[in-house]
Image (tube, rainbow, N blue to C red):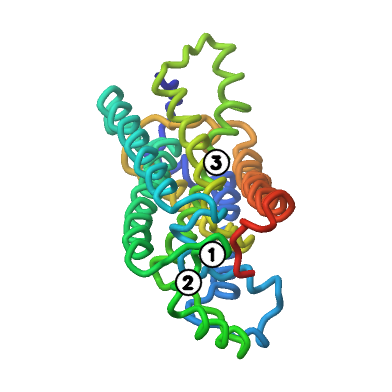
Amino acid sequence: MELTWTSDTTSLNYWLTWKFLLCALWVFSSMIIASFLIWKYEESVNTITFKEVTQQKRTWFQYDCEAWMPCIKGIHPVWLMVFRIVSFLLLLAAGVADVTTHGTELFLYYTQWTLTLTTFYFAFGSLLSVYGCLNHHKTFHVGPDQDLFLPLTHKEETTNQQEKGHFLTAGFWGYTFQIIFQMTAGAVVLTDSVYWIVIVPFLTIVGYEMGFLTVVAHSLNLFLLLGDTALNSLRFPWFRISYFLLLTAFYVLFEWIIHAFVATWWPYPFLDLSVPFAPLWYLLVALLHLPCYSIFLLVVKLKYYILSRWFPQSYQTLR
């Protein structure tokens, strides 16, 4: 069940206001900032030279096997694969059940965008894990003192490459998967935190009753993503908050376009440009991206800190 807020948005007078201009400024400014970060920091090269970058910048790159390899040697890649497949099936079932119950109008909600993105992340991750496990079975031999990063037959060659200042990096799909991971993480934290901290307390006052599917849509995604984060070897470069910003900006533009042509309801009250302090609401939601992304960034950093302290012998890293 969702409460809705209506407004006459098809009228030209609704859009030709200083509120809309100020809100548009926030949205397009965030898109410009995000585009600048991508242009400045994103890399597409397959190899990097050790001497060309600092140690901090090397953590921005995605290496071979990190898309499907667990972060601890004792965990076989098949366990991460199974977790991702089960997570995908659970999220797919929840999404289908939600749409079947409430209709396709659910895609007007940012929640449904986030749930769909999380489902796609686990589907993509499952495919990469299947590929990785097959490749691992064919070419990898894992002993107690060996890691899963590189084929044993190429170990000596790669060691020489590293001494020369080169690291093997992931290809297009590896980078794409890491980007989706970071974008999904920010969106999930934003969706669930706004729902449980802001929306639920307000709706409770007006007698809102939460259904089972609504609770699942605002909790299962975060629970499963944290589980995947605990197992995977993916890093979390800070500048990829840009993709998270673009996702939300495209959602807002989508809502504006829909409401400009169709007299329909707003899925969230703070999106309605006619409400008091609408520009302040837009600015507040935009600023919320920083703590939401930073929280997950800290979770990933804490994970690697704990692994390096508690499992120094079995912790896998090329950094």
Q: Is residue 110 left or right of residue 261?
A: right
Residue 240 image-quadrant placement: bottom right
Q: Which one is nearer the viewer's eye here, 106 or 241?
A: 241
Residue 277, above or below 41:
above
Q: Is residue 72 left or right of residue 89?
A: right
Instruction: Tell me which residue sits at (28%, 32%) in the image.
Output: 96
Which label sits on residue 226? Answer: 3
Q: Quadrant of the N terminus?
A: top left
Residue 255, above or below 223:
below
Which residue is outermost to the bottom?
164
Determine whether label 1 and label 3 are within 8 Å by CB: no
Q: Amino acid at mark 1?
A: Asp
Which residue is outermost to the right?
309
Q: Which one is nearer the viewer's eye here, 303 or 287?
A: 303
Q: Quadrant of the C terminus?
A: bottom right
The disc, 2 or 3, on the residue closer to the chain's N-terminal end is 2
Residue 256, above or below 70:
above
Q: Which one is nearer the viewer's eye here, 279 or 210?
A: 210
Residue 130 image-quadrant placement: bottom left
Mark 3 secondary-structure assignment: helix
Instruction: Tell me which residue sits at (62%, 87%) in the image.
Output: 165
How packed mark 2 is, by other alpha carbons closer than 10 Å (few <14, some 14-19, many 20 or more), is: some
Q: Amino acid at mark 2?
A: Leu
On the image, the x and y values in percent for residue 192 come to 54, 33
Q: Amino acid at mark 3?
A: Leu
Instruction: Tell me which residue sits at (41%, 32%) in the image.
Output: 8
Tell me the distance, in whole angstroms, between the alpha carbons under discs 1 and 2: 7 Å
Kindly identify which residue carries mark 1.
147
Which residue is outermost to the front?
144
Q: Is residue 318 left or right of residue 174?
A: right
On the image, the x and y values in percent for residue 266 come to 43, 32
Tell me the distance, in whole angstroms, between the alpha carbons under discs 2 and 3: 26 Å
